[in-house]
Image (tube, rainbow, N blue to C red):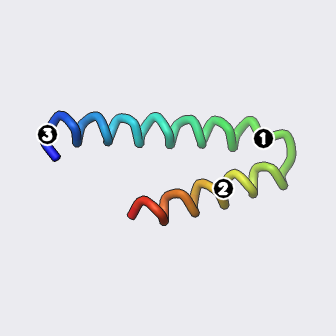
Amino acid sequence: MNIAAKIRARRAEARTRRAVSKAIDAAATPAMRHELMLLAQAHMQGLR
């Protein structure tokens, strides 16, 4: 992976983190917030 691709991947990951964080903050119920957190954690485990 070249440097440009690493930078693009890092920026995409940051955008995803911001979007997930915003979705968690805007969740209608605590249950939805918890579900979004679980999905985000499971997704991050799959990336590593």
Residue at 69 percent across and 51 percent down: it is: 36
Figure quadrant of the C terminus = bottom left
Residue at 50 percent across and 39 percent down: it is: 16
Residue at 60 percent across and 42 percent down: it is: 21
Marks 1 and 2 close (CB-CB < 8 Å): no
Residue 20 percent across, percent down from the top left? 59, 42
Left or right: 13 as drawn, with respect to 28: left
Numbered tag placed on residue 27 in the rendering: 1
Q: Quadrant of residue 31?
A: bottom right
Left or right: 11 as drawn, with respect to 26: left
In the rendered structure, which amino acid carries the disc numbered 1? Ala
In the rendered structure, which amino acid carries the disc numbered 2? Met
CA–CA distance in space, label 3 to label 2: 31 Å
Q: Quadrant of residue 11?
A: top left
- The residue singled out by tag 2 in the image is 37
Q: Quadrant of residue 3?
A: top left
CA–CA distance in space, label 1 to label 3: 36 Å
Marks 3 and 2 close (CB-CB < 8 Å): no
First along the sequence among labels 3 and 2 = 3
In the rendered structure, which amino acid carries the disc numbered 3? Ile
First along the sequence among labels 1 and 2 = 1
- The residue singled out by tag 3 in the image is 3
